[in-house]
Image (cartoon, rainbow, N blue to C red):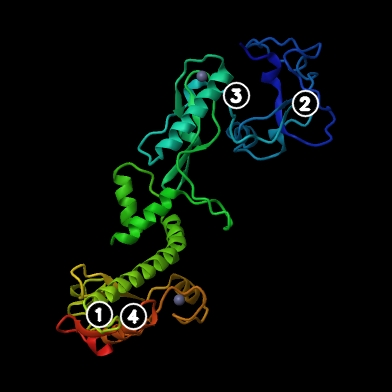
């Protein structure tokens, strides 16, 4: 099926309301008397026969639209003001469920690995296949994931299935499950991204390490800012779950004490240790203080063989927001300003285990199922027991 003669001579322009041509499109069945509808010969350079065609209204895909309206040369001469034959309507994102004029060779298949939900993927492919069968009347082409139209949402991806023979395009289909959060504004988060955060919170690797790991197995790696955003959503929930879990474990200890014939509120045996985010050997001969910006204190019970974690405290000197504000000339102190992530001053001694022990002891007494500590096992050089 060849293109009509008129299609090659029309000058494209953007759609304007109240145009002088009216809304009658020049179609193959309805042509002007002067429009022959034939392909022009290479030697035929006249435009007189084409100028009287009625305008056609075309809705192109976003890519085609941008190709037509954007030109490296700027100026009014890009579009003809006299023969406005083709009126471009607002572009569609992509053609859905119908045949278009793109050549089949332009279909590039997505490569690499993806993390997908099997149920969701099977249903998405099936729906695309059924729609393709209906739209293309028995086409035997293979439906592939169109590379240009794939979208990534963190670790998950949304794909458009396209036919290799007939240019069918499905709608954009997510291949992951979403968590319905009707009480929160914005897009519902992907289950995958939340699950990734769960894994990251339970291991010592950072977002950067996670990205390297994902890239090495050819999986789409979310941007660091995306990972940080999900971590900010995930962090408070994780903190609450862990605090409830530690309170539950303290309850088990109290029951154990009772079963051993002791009072539920008897002081217990416990162990304590502190971990810094930087190894202390890094600061050898550089500073007499701990070179860390973050540290965590962990208290483990010594009543049962399970050695449950019953107390935790995290000290942090880092605050990105405070740092940015100070660079812009604002006088802010960390901790203390709105949205501050630090809970320790920059000039504070992070190696003060006595203070850490004091905070941990007060947390053990303040939470649900409070316990007192009778004997504390610590490092020989630590002073945490003085804080209890
Ligand atoms: Zn097809
Ligand atoms: Zn701060």
Sequence-wise, which precedes: disc 1 or disc 2? 2
| Distance between mark 2 and mark 4 Cα atoms | 82 Å
Residue 320, relative to residue 226: is it above or below?
below
Sequence-wise, which precedes: disc 3 or disc 4? 3
The reply to whether dot 1 and dot 3 touch (C-beta < 8 Å) is no
Element type where label 4 sits in the image: helix
Q: Mark 2 points at which residue?
A: 83
Q: Position of residue 181 (x, y in %)?
A: 54, 54
Density class for disc 1 (Cα within 10 Å; few <14, some 14-19, many ≥20) is some
Q: Position of residue 324 (x, y in %)?
A: 47, 71
In the image, is 244 to the left or to the right of 1?
left
Question: Which residue is at 25% across, 80% downward?
Answer: 290
Number of the label disc, if any, that sits on residue 290: 1
In the image, is 292 to the left or to the right of 132?
left
Question: Which residue is at 21% across, 77% downward?
Answer: 260
Kindly report which numbered mark, 2 or 3, lies closer to the viewer in this rendering: 3
Kindly report which numbered mark, 2 or 4, lies closer to the viewer in this rendering: 4
Number of the label disc, if any, that sits on residue 98: 3
């Amino acid at each position: 099926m060849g293109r009509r003669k008129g299609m090659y001579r029309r000058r494209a322009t953007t759609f304007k309301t109240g145009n002088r041509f009216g809304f009658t499109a020049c179609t193959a069945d309805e042509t002007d008397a002067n429009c022959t509808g034939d392909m022009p010969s290479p030697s035929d350079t006249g435009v007189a026969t084409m100028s009287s065609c009625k305008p056609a209204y075309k809705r192109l895909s976003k890519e085609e639209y941008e190709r037509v309206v954007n030109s490296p040369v700027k100026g009014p001469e890009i579009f003809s003001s006299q023969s406005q034959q083709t009126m471009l309507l607002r572009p569609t994102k992509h053609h859905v469920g119908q045949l278009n004029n793109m050549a089949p060779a332009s279909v590039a298949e997505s490569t690499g690995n993806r993390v997908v939900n099997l149920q969701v993927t099977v249903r998405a492919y099936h729906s695309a296949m059924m729609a393709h069968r209906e739209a293309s009347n028995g086409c035997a082409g293979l439906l592939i994931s169109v590379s240009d139209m794939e979208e990534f949402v963190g670790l998950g991806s949304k794909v458009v299935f396209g036919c290799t023979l007939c240019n069918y395009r499905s709608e954009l289909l997510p291949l992951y499950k979403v968590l319905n959060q009707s009480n929160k504004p914005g897009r519902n988060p992907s289950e995958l991204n939340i699950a990734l955060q769960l894994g990251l919170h339970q291991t010592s690797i950072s977002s950067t390490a996670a990205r390297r790991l994902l890239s090495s197995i050819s999986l789409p790696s979310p941007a660091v800012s995306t990972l940080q955003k999900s971590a900010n959503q995930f962090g408070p929930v994780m903190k609450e779950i862990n605090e409830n879990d530690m309170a539950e474990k303290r309850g088990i200890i109290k029951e154990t004490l009772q079963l051993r014939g002791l009072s539920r509120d008897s002081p217990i045996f416990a162990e304590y240790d502190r971990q810094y985010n930087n190894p202390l050997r890094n600061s050898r001969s550089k500073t007499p203080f701990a070179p860390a910006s973050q540290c965590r204190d962990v208290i483990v019970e010594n009543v049962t063989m399970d050695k449950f974690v019953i107390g935790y405290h995290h000290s942090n000197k880092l605050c990105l927001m405070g740092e940015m504000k100070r660079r812009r000339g604002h006088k802010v102190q960390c901790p203390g300003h709105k949205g501050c992530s630090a809970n320790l001053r920059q000039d504070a001694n992070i190696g003060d285990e006595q203070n850490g022990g004091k905070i941990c002891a007060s947390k053990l007494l303040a939470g649900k199922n409070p316990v007192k500590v009778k004997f504390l096992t610590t490092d020989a050089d630590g002073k945490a027991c003085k804080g209890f």
